[in-house]
Image: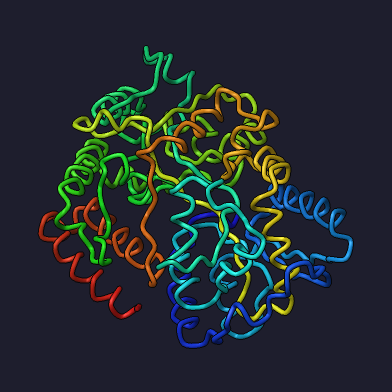
Amino acid sequence: MFRRRTLLALSAATALLAACTPGTNANDEIAPAGQEAKGTVEFWHFFTDRESDAIDAAIAKFEKLHPDIDVKVTSGQDDAKMLQAISSGKGPDVGLSYSTDIVGKFCSGGAWRDLTPFIDRDKVDLEQFPQTVRGYTSYHDRRCAMPFLADVYGLYYNKTLLAQAGYTAPPKTMTELADMAKKLTKRAPDGTIEVAGFVPLLNFYEHTPQHLAPLWDAKWLSGDEKSVIGTDPNWQPMLKWHKDLVDWYGYDRLQQFTAGLGDEWNADNAFQAGKIAMAVDGEYRVAFVEDQAPNLDFGTAALPVADKQADRYGAGFVTGNIMGISANSKNPEASWELVKYLTTDTDAIVGLANSIKNVPTTKDALASPALEADERFRPFLDIFANPGTSTTPPNASGPKYVEMTQEFVNTYLSGATPDLAGGLKDLDGKIDQALDLGR
């Protein structure tokens, strides 16, 4: 399934976009207030299967409310495909991206037009969105996106496996997580991992530096968009914690174990199959488990935090699906009507949140009595509302600095880069050079 993790595929596409995106003034084609939106809107999104069906249902309701607008939907389209299509002049009218990582590129490169004239004309109240959400839909005061739904990351735990080991609650600190992971792990006589209490590789499923950094309050960029990974005091403790647990398992043993696990988005997902006792994942996993592994007894909670930052417990990482209107849209007025409906209409947002099991991004939708929030989904709403919850800062190079950090972390955890402090300092220089080239 196309969701949140095709960062590497974006590099070539964003480079092509920078060279080829047509210059378009977003004000040129905006109809006067009161003019009826009509015609065809081509809409691309990344969802597939069950989630795509939910999008189709929302579009059907939109078309019933707007009989003069015909929406042509194409599912399963990731950001790389969309950027390539826009750069060649063949992109959709409206695009739905799976991640905020790319908003800086969409805005600064001109792939998506500035929505401010539409927002001002229709008096859309941006205060209905939490501050973090408003922050990840704009770049340098250019608001080229509107928030669709949010993804919030927390801890999933197998209640049966925890109970067998004598645990009645999930961990709240990283020391507790490491201790529980070791006790929950089951090995064959030859040392082969049969069940992992927790997989500490920072490239496994949704367990990534991006999703874990807020738990240590680790910073990525300075205000002038320079890398601070090498000087921030929290990156080294975060990575050392992971390296210690990787070494306890054995790097090669972990590689062997994860190579035999199921695909993240299939029914044989390792957590769903009972091969992992605790895992990092987004709120959407609740729906996947209920659909693909209905007999699994599981719970959800906020992710554990660094021991020295226990007061941060309850915070986490948030990203979001974002919508925009292509620079070369043939029907921007009707396109805006679709974007406005899917991102500000409370009934539409709640319906999609209930169907896809994503977190709604407006205050009214979050407070709606129609929002389905059981004991497994509620923790993600609490994480979303926590003032310590954060996301990665936008940048004109898109996710480049995240990709480079991921590559470094992989080499460090494998043992190929033994000098952590020196490696992080060197990473700062490489990121700064890459971001300067991307501006």
Along the viewing direction, whichever of 58 and 12 lies nearer the viewer: 58
Q: Is residue 85 visible?
A: no
Q: Position of residue 113 (x, y in %)?
A: 57, 74
Q: Residue at x 33, y 31 (%)?
A: 304
Q: Residue at x 62, y 24 (%)?
A: 295
Give the colour scheme shown: rainbow
Residue 40 to residue 190: above or below: below
Q: Position of residue 233 (x, y in %)?
A: 15, 47
Q: Is residue 365 left or right of residue 132?
A: right
Along the viewing direction, whichever of 53 and 147 lies nearer the viewer: 147
Along the viewing direction, whichever of 117 and 49 lies nearer the viewer: 117
Along the viewing direction, whichever of 289 and 370 lies nearer the viewer: 370
Q: Is residue 17 visible?
A: yes
Q: Quadrant of the N terminus?
A: bottom right
Give the total of numbered labels.
0
Residue 25 to residue 421: above or below: below
Q: Residue at x 24, y 53 (%)?
A: 414
Q: Quadrant of the C terminus?
A: bottom left
Q: Position of residue 410 (x, y in %)?
A: 29, 56
Q: Position of residue 142 (x, y in %)?
A: 47, 69
Q: Is residue 52 left or right of residue 85?
A: right
Q: Residue at x 48, y 50 (%)?
A: 133
Residue 296 to residue 134: above or below: above
